Amino acid sequence: MRNTLLIRVGQDEDGSCEWLPLDDAGQPVGRVRSGDLAAAAAEANGLRVAVLVPGIDCLLTQATIPGRNRQKLLRAVPYALEEQLIEDVENLHFSLGPALPAGGYPVVVITTRRMDAILGACRSAGLDVYQLIPDLLAVPCTGDAVCVVIDGDVALVRTGPYSGFAVDTENLGLLLAGLPQPAEDSPRRPLSIQLPAGCVLPDLGEPAAEAEVTHYEGPVLMQLAQGLGGVLIDLLQGPYSRNQEWGKLWRPWRVTAALLLGGILLSNIVTGVDYFRLSGEQDELNARMQTVFMESFPGTKRVVDPRVQMQQQLEQLQRLAGSGAQFLTLLARSADVLRTAKDIEIAGASYRAGRLDVDLTAANLQVLDQLKQSLSARGLAVEIQSAAADAGQRVKSRLRIQESEA
């Protein structure tokens, strides 16, 4: 069990607990600390949280049920054990271990009230519980020995990988004497008892004669941390599984999430429609810009970016004229008239010494005269430099436009 904050909750529901961090090798870091769950949560940053449930709250047993599907087994095990239990199975929670070699499955039984109390207290303290384990299965034990860890007036007894019980020390000897033993010609199962330092072994009667007794220093949680290396039974199964918990949290938000997703999709569709519409308008504007540019500068052989090329041409005219501000002013005052005039085709333009010369073709002399009057109405001095009619009566002309002196 690596990178874990190991917490052992107390039997009372006052939130008291002990905790011990484990490093990436599963070894204890520092000393066991005690307090409430909120204090333990303050040290849980970056660590998975495993909670040990007092063995007095759990029943470790076995059930023989057919099948391999875990979900179906979890639904069937309450009825397989119903006759062995005093409590109504509807008030109990059942967790399965791995299949046993001899058949059947190990089962941990605990009341749903106790499960709700432990998980509710952890959530209130800000703890996200990763595993919930009976502390009986954390008692250090090897081989086929019966291992006992005494903690105050309670003894935690582990009789196998997935079996054991918790009992008060006064009745420990009686229950140890009643454990099944191998056949008469086989040696008795070893008995290992761990006592807190300075404590005296309780009166166990005959089982004490062959017991190997050792003493441990500090809180019992340090001993339990050493017994977590094997396969454990996690109580977070069935309705208490982490997937189920996430499902419960997710369920109230499903409609909101669906509406949010629908809104995002609708927004994307509208954005896409706008994109295609604006792309079409941009293409149309680019085409119009290219047309205006070619009409203004007919000598241009290749148009790549009409806006940039127009700017370059204007800057060139500005440099040639030596007076950019005057040229732009004159161009701005005459451009609207030239652009909106009908039956006029502009062939070219040049600017020099404050005069704008425009080469154009008009449908007839009357159109040319109307153009001159429109420009004069803008306060411009307009002079027809030349005018020559072709065979089709179209008039090629040059107009000189400048600021009026009046």
Image: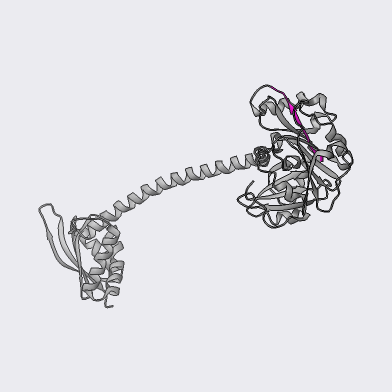
Residue 34 lies, in percent from the top left, at 77, 55
Nearest to the observer: residue 389 or residue 401: 401
Structure colour scheme: one colour
Classify residue 301 by image quadrant.
bottom left
Image quadrant occupied by the C terminus: bottom left
Q: Furthest-top residue in view?
A: 66
Nearest to the observer: residue 99 or residue 211: 211
Relative vertical location of residue 390 with respect to residue 262 in this rendering, above or below: below
Relative vertical location of residue 218 with respect to residue 355 in this rendering, above or below: above
Relative vertical location of residue 4 with respect to residue 163 in this rendering, above or below: below
Q: Give the total of numbered labels.
A: 0
Report if residue 28 is visible in the image: yes
Residue 186 lies, in percent from the top left, at 74, 28
Residue 64 lies, in percent from the top left, at 72, 23
From which residue to which does the magenta span run?
Answer: 56-65
Left/right placement of residue 265 relative to residue 21 reads left
Q: Furthest-left residue in view?
A: 391
Residue 339 lies, in percent from the top left, at 28, 59
Classify residue 259 by image quadrant.
top right
Q: Furthest-bottom residue in view?
A: 405
Left/right placement of residue 263 relative to residue 135 reads left
Query: Residue 167 magenta-drawn?
Result: no
Query: Residue 58 magenta-drawn?
Result: yes
Left/right placement of residue 66 relative to residue 376 reads right
Report if residue 54 is visible in the image: no
Nearest to the observer: residue 369 or residue 259: 259
Left/right placement of residue 52 relative to residue 387 reads right
